[in-house]
Amino acid sequence: MMQELLKIDWLVFLRQTLPLLLPLGGGGFLLLVGPFFKRSHRFNFIFSIAIALLALFFAWQEWLGATNQTVNLLLFDRFTYLFAILFLIALILTLLLSYSYLESFGLVRPEYYALLLFAVFGMMCMVAGHDLMVVFLGLEVMSVSVYVLAGFQRSNVLSVEAALKYFLVGAFASSFLLMGIAFIYGATGTTDLIVLHQKGLGMLAGETRVYALVGLSLLAVGLGFKIALVPFHFWAADVYHGAPVIVTTFMATAVKAAGFGAILRVVWALFQWEPLLFANMIWVASVLTMTIGNIAALTQKNLKRMLAYSSIAHAGYAILPLVAFSKQGASVTSSISFYMLAYILMTVGAFAVLIALSEKEEKCTIQDLSGLGTRKPFLAFSMTLFLLSLTGIPPTLGFFGKYYLFLQAVQAGYIWLAVIGVINSVISVYYYLGPVVAMYFSKETADQKVGPTYWSPQAVLVVIWFTFLGVSLFGLFPSNLLDLIQTSVSSWLVAGK
Amino acid sequence: MMITLTHYLILAAVLFCIGVFGVVVRRNILIIFMSIELMLSAVNLVFLSFSRYLGTQDGHVWVFMVLTVAAAEAAVGLGIIVALFRNKQTIYVDEVKELKG
């Protein structure tokens, strides 16, 4: 063990882990020094943004020079840094949305920023870990931080209820996940993802095979809870609805992307033991998740709740290409990564418009949007773009994201699955266009005319502009972005073999 | 009678199922929480028995990690329960249903 530790080049290791260490150290610094700066919200805000930007810069540097090295339990390849960049982008956008929201809702506390930074550290561990232990610990660091964030508005009973539900379901799911890992450990004697990938189920026989299958099913249940797949989705709508909308933004984007990043690693290592069974499982889960998510979204009046169900439906679309994982792993992985990026941009955009409308209370019902087209033309137009992108209408980023997802299924011969996906997208047009109709074709209500104190803070507008440009420009020119993601993914899948 | 790996695994499975049953059936948040802890203890038992059976130490390390995570979750979870009690004066989940739609 000593020998191994001495062999590591610590300076290189420090440089490689800097994107992970910065959020961790920054969060710790805010908690230790925060009390002395308690009055200065601005300091906490600028400090966290600076940390996130610095981490983003180093993650990009490391992406350029990634060597696919594994050091102890961490895997430093381009896939890790790609997801690190995704999380950091989501973090920066969330931070920009938070400042004015926290001020106007009286939630100014340094812990908010510290918890966001810790959560991002956990997410990076989930993707960087090449041992299930690191993946699990990262997942818990992230989850525990987000439980607290969901209940951050602690005088509001809705927020506390959301935190409670999220906590109970999350802890319940974690024990399933752990039981799954325990059985996989029992079957193979290791929890190292690379070793597990090489072992394969073919070599397991008799009792160990039973242990492995029990482990895989429990693990699948645990992960299904975490990314809200049907039938383990019931918590998501309540949690997204009750949490403060800035936290909902973070949960719907970064937390979901982290779940998918970890799932891709785990699928690569474990679920290829039984490719056919796995493909059937994914087929059923994907169809159920898409359909139930979309149908439940149809009747929602509250946009937060609607976007929550839509996020369930989008998880269904995003796991769809996994049916083809054993045939074309690299392109499946890159299509999912691409979709995560697209999903982060369009969902943050849609929530940012809602935040721009909420001053003293959250305005998230469809009625609150009525007549927005004349009052705030830019907000209404960008909201329309984000909703169209979520529906998957060209030439937006969401269209290309969905196109690559469905393409994988078609190429592997799962035509019907793609057809069901397209039918679901058609169903989703109904509820995504509801707000658009309200914005452009319905009259303002009386009290909206009396109090037009629309207050759109600069930082929120910056986020809307950024996501707006991202969704529209990458929608027109997606190929560079796709190349970048394919490069990141191929280096990992080659490295593992 | 020899106590074999299977005995330990069956005991762990029974504990785990009691935990799941408790989470699903009971309405008191503290008892739900205790049931989750019971599930985690079952996990620890599985790790330890496999570790002993396989003769590797990884399982022991996992148990430490699981215990640590359980402690962190307990701290946060109890905090959330206190926050709920301040708002609603109840610890029964079926009385907590403001969110619906």
Image: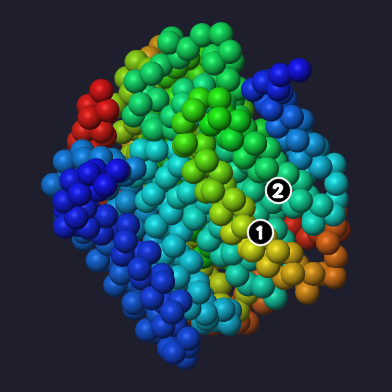
**Residue farthest toward the left in the current orientation of the protein:** A65
Tag 1's secondary structure?
Answer: helix
Relative placement, left or right, of A491 versus A192 is left
Question: To which residue does mark 2 refer?
Answer: B37
Q: Which mark is residue B74?
A: 1
- Circles 2 and 1 on the same subunit: yes
Label pair 2/1, CB-CB below 8 angstroms? yes
Q: Quadrant of residue A42?
A: bottom left
Q: Return the residue nearer the eye: A306 or A368.
A: A306
Tag 2's secondary structure?
Answer: helix
Across and down, in percent, residue A93 comes to 38, 63
Across and down, in percent, residue A413 comes to 40, 11
Q: Name the amino acid, label 1.
A: Ala
Q: Return the residue nearer the eye: A235 or B28.
A: B28
Quarter of the image with the C terminus of chain A is: top left
Q: Return the residue nearer the eye: B16 or A441.
A: B16
